[in-house]
Every structure is written in structure tokens, then in C-alpha cells.
Amino acid sequence: MTTSERAPPDSPTAKIMTVLDCVAQQGGVSTVHIAEQTGLPPPTAHRICSELERLGHLQRVPGSRNWMVSRPLVDLSARVLASAAMTTAADAVLTSLTREIGEMTSFGVQVADHVVYLASAEAPQELTLSFRAGRKAPLFCTSSGRLFLARLKGDELEAYLEASERPSYTPYTVTDKASLRRAIEQVRTEGYAITCQEYLLHVAGAAVPVVGDHGLFLGALSVAAPDVRTSAEKLLEIVPHLQNASELFAKCLKGHCRR
């Protein structure tokens, strides 16, 4: 069924959810485009967007009249995702991995320009809670985030680099476009990501993709550790442990894990 043939949503709630879904999936869209994609009359699409803006769920793209999701909606999404039930077996994989390597491990997915951590297993001595389930972190300066950026096509990555805010969280945060391009290309080549003190001082991390059937990218499995206990070389030794666990984790997410 083409967009023009699609039946428009027929209840107020369905109309609102359809508009939110359209903006969340495509981002930076005009009211006319939303109307075309949802089958709603343009005045209705405009009224819904304006009300969602008033409620703080949508906002205008800076410098244009197009719509994008707002930070409060991203925060709400993070809470919803974190509360979604992870399988007991998947949690067990994280717990086992943390015991094996002695450091905190997490599973995260991308929500807008952040990584949202859906599950985590904490090491006995934690120095930070920033990667605990329910928390979020930027894409550009975290190991998990760079895995997601490495999946973008060339023009998509350039659009992200052009539009994203990249504050210096620490003196080691990589913010300039050229350096980020090189770092992301390295992730594409190696298949894993390592960052050191870019998001949090004295914390380093590594991440590998969790891949399902037919190459479907399910999320990122990561480790975070204080620099007093780790280094880039030590993280390289941990990467194979992450990769082995990611295969089992993917099976658990599909419900195929046998305990």
C-alpha cells in the first residue's frame, strides 16, 4: 500500500502516535511531509505538532520550520526502554561476563543522538553509575555510540556531524569532525570500539556489536572500567570476551538461549 493509499488514523490517540512515530523515524520533517506520510490533512498534522510542541515532546529544528523530537521525549523513551523486560537469560549473560572480566558490562541501543543502556551488570567496586540500565550517554564520545555511528552511510554520518552538538566532557574528548571521521572509520575496519576518558575522566570502555539473524544490528555490548584498573591494551584483551558474549546475548534476545 502506498502512502497516498494508506488509511489515516481514526482516533485522536492514533493520530498523535502516528505523528510521533513519523517524526521519530525520520526527523527534521516538515508538516507537509508528516501529512503525506500519515494520511492526515495538513491542518490536522499542524495542530497535532503544535500541541506536541506545547507539551514539550516536539521542537523545531534550529534554523528551520521542520520538526524533531525533543530532549524530554528522548528521556521518556529511555525510561520506557529501560523498564522493558530483558530476558532472565540475557541478564545472566551480562552477569557472567562481568564476573569473567571483573568490570561493569552493559547492553545499549540508540535513541536519537544517545546510547540508552537497557541492561547492566555491575562489578563489585563501581566508580561510576553512568552506564547503568536506564542511563544514557552521547554517541560521539562513547565506545557503544561509535558503533552506531559506524553503521551510518557517508552522507548520513556527515549530516550527523554537521547537526550534532559535541561538547568537551573531558580534556580528552574528540570533538572535531576530521578526528571523529578517522575514529569511526577505524571502528568500521576493526569491528569494535575503544574510548579512553572521552566521556568521563578516568574511565575507559570498549564495545562490540550484538548481531542477530541476517546481520541485524541489535545493539552494543560494552565494558567500562576505571583507568587505574585498565588501559587500551587491557581492553584489547577483553574484546574477544565481549565478542563471545555478544553471540550468546543475541541468542538470548531471540529467546533461543538455554540456561
Image (tube, rainbow, N blue to C red):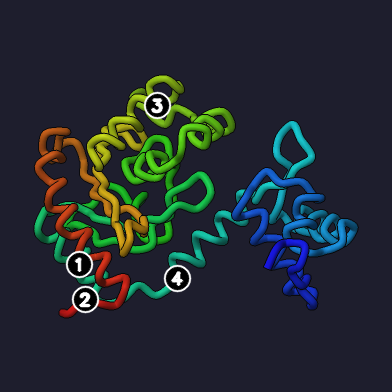
Is 66 drawn above or below residue 124 in the view shown? above
Question: Which residue is denoted by mark 1 in the rendering?
Answer: 93
User: Mark 4 or mark 1, which has the lower sequence index?
Assistant: 4
Q: Amino acid at mark 1?
A: Val
Q: Amino acid at mark 3?
A: Arg
Q: Secondary structure at mark 2?
A: loop
Is 164 drawn above or below residue 246 in the view shown? above
Q: CA distance from mark 4 to mark 3?
A: 34 Å
Mark sitting on residue 257: 2
Judged by depth in the image, the label closer to the viewer, 4 or 1, is 1
Mark sitting on residue 181: 3
Residue lying at the far right in this picture: please name it. 43
Q: Is residue 202 visible?
A: no
Q: CA distance from mark 2 to mark 4?
A: 21 Å
Question: Which residue is denoted by mark 4 in the rendering?
Answer: 83
Q: CA distance from mark 1 to mark 3?
A: 33 Å
Question: CB under 8 Å between callouts 2 and 4?
Answer: no
Relative to 30, is 117 on the left or the right?
left
User: Mark 2 or mark 1, which has the lower sequence index?
Assistant: 1
Residue at 21 percent across and 44 percent down: it is: 225
Residue 17 horizontal/vertical position (percent): 69, 67
